[in-house]
Every structure is written in C-alpha cells, then in structure tokens.
C-alpha cells in the first residue's frame, strides 16, 4: 500500500509548484482511492501521470472547495470520457445531501434525457456515524474533526484512519488543534499525516505548527505535516517532526 500526495498545500495557496493537499492511495490489489478532489485536481492528477478513468473510488472529507472543487470535472470525465463505468464515492451520510444540493447539482443535474442525481455520476457508498467500512482489504474509519462552525453549529468534517496488516495510519484532513479528541489515534498510529497551518497569524480553523510543537515528542516523531501555507517553512525535523510533506511525495505504508 502506498500514499501519494498530489499536492501538500493549503486551500488558499498560490504556489504553482504545489497543489492542494489531495492524495492518492494505492492498495495492494492495484486499486486507487482518491482522498478528496479539490479545484486543483485536473492539474495535480495530470502532473502525477494519472487519469480519472484510473481512479476506482473517491473519499470526500468535507465540503470546502480544496476538497470538492474538482468533483464536477471528475464526474464529467468519468461519465462522458471514461469507458470504465462509475467511480465509487465514499462519503459520510451527513455530507451526501449538501454535496449534491449546494455544490454539484448546478452543473451536473442536467442530462439530455432526465434531471440527474448524484447516483448518475457515482456509485455512492454512504458511511453511517461510527461505522467502519472495508475497501480492497483495508479497514477505514471516519474520525470526526473540529474544523469550522457555522452559526454556532459544527460543520461535518471527517479524517481517516486506515488499518492494514496490523498497522494504523491517521490522516486528519482539516482540523483545529484538538489533541484530546485525537489522543487515541495519535497513540495507535504508525504514521500520522497532519493538517498544519504555517501562517504568521493563525486562522483558528486549522492546526498551527506552533500548537503541534507542544505535543509529546513520541507523537511528533510520527507526524508528517501537510496543508501548509505558501512561503518559508519552519525546520520541522529540528522540532522533532518527521517532516513537511512535499508535492509528489510517496509513502510506502506496507
């Protein structure tokens, strides 16, 4: 199993040498899972040498554009260009309706023969709260994160734990600094891929490098940092981290 970072940057980046932090997971069976599908995806996927028809499934963590902004392009590619049929969409049940109604239906709902639904473009696999699911020999668990609030309500956003051959890998996706919420996943994980903001003035909706620097050194040593901002980065290794992920970096998770 391997994990390829198609990009490692934030949703507001302008660095053309980096892309939004979408990932491609390769299973031992040869299947490919795209983890998030942001606005940069047609560029980052192409630079990495892959086409939409090669992607077997897509996981969506939450509804910000750097995680779903490429879904319309991907859906049209799979329906009208690819001969491989529909890709599987793996998504928490709380995200299905707003994904379609607020983000995708404007561009995708019109087909010549009918008014389309999400199921015309994807084979939708809804994951219920607290439910683990299995895909191509992997056990994947959704981990609710604290990312953003709207009118006082926590908006749905989910990281992933991936269990494979006795090892566990934790991908936070976008998250505020909530070490108590993540403690169990931090301890159990072989490697952790962590949201890491590097703005001079923290936004408050992402975990900041300075906050992560307060974690137990044993946990920091397992942390690869991604979703960082443009500009010069701190020396992560000198602070005890595994490092900053680079665009195009691939991890062997065997």
Image (tube, rainbow, N blue to C red):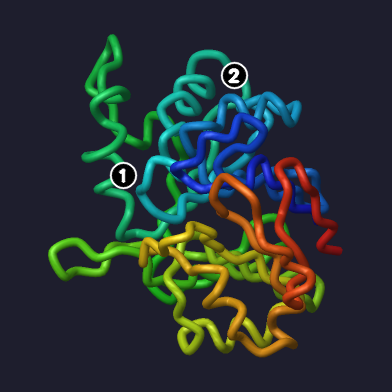
Tell us which disc is closer to us: 1 or 2: 1
> Where residue 198 sits in the image (x, y, percent)?
54, 59
Q: Position of residue 102 (x, y in %)?
A: 23, 40
Residue appearing at x 45%, y 67% in the figure: 175
Looking at the rendered structure, the secondary structure element under dot 1 is helix
Marks 1 and 2 close (CB-CB < 8 Å): no
Q: Is residue 135 left or right of residue 204?
A: right
Q: Determine the secondary structure under disc 2.
A: loop
Q: Which residue occupies the foreground of this view, 14 or 22?
A: 14
Sort mark 1 into few (<14), some (14-19) or many (20+) by Cα contacts within 10 Å. Answer: some
Q: Within 10 Å of the Cα at label 2, are there few (<14), some (14-19), or many (20+) other Cα atoms?
A: some
Name which residue lies at 37% across and 71% down.
Answer: 146
The quarter of the image holding the C terminus is bottom right
Could you say which is closer to the camera, residue 220 or residue 80? 220
In the figure, is residue 15 to the left or right of 39?
right
The structure residue drawn at horizontal position 62% and vertical position 57%, both measured from the top left corner, is 226
* Residue matched to label 1: 99
Instruction: List the residue tagged with mark 2.
Output: 82
Residue at the limit of the structure toward the top, as seen here: 112
Q: How many marks?
A: 2
Q: Name the outermost residue toward the left.
A: 151
Q: Quadrant of the N terminus?
A: bottom right
113 left or right of 1 in image = left
Upstream in the sequence, badge 1 or badge 2? 2
On screen, residue 95 versus residue 30, left or right, reads left
Decide: is 241 above or below 35: below
The front one of 241 and 6 is 241
Task: Report which quarter residue 169 is drawn in.
Answer: bottom right
């Amino acid at each position: 199993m391997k994990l390829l970072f198609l990009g490692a940057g934030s949703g507001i980046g302008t660095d053309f040498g980096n892309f939004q932090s979408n990932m491609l997971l390769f299973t031992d069976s040869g299947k490919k899972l795209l983890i998030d599908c942001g606005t940069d995806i047609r560029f980052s996927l192409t630079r990495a040498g892959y086409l939409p028809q090669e992607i077997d499934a897509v996981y969506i963590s939450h509804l910000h554009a750097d995680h779903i902004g490429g879904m319309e392009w991907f859906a049209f590619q799979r329906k009208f260009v690819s001969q491989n049929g529909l890709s599987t969409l793996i998504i928490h049940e709380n995200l299905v309706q707003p994904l379609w109604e607020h983000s995708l239906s404007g561009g995708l709902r019109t087909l010549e023969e009918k008014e389309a639904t999400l199921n015309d473009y994807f084979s939708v696999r809804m994951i219920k709260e607290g439910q683990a699911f299995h895909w191509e020999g992997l056990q994947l668990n959704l981990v609710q994160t604290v990312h953003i609030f709207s009118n006082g309500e926590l908006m749905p956003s989910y990281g992933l734990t991936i269990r494979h051959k006795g090892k566990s890998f934790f991908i936070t996706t976008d998250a505020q600094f909530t070490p108590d919420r993540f403690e169990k996943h931090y301890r159990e994980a072989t490697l952790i891929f962590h949201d890491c903001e590097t703005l001079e003035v923290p936004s408050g909706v992402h975990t900041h490098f300075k906050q992560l620097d307060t974690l137990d050194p044993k946990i920091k040593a397992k942390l690869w940092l991604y979703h960082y901002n443009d500009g010069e980065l701190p020396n992560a290794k000198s602070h005890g981290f595994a490092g900053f992920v680079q665009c195009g970096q691939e991890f062997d998770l065997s």
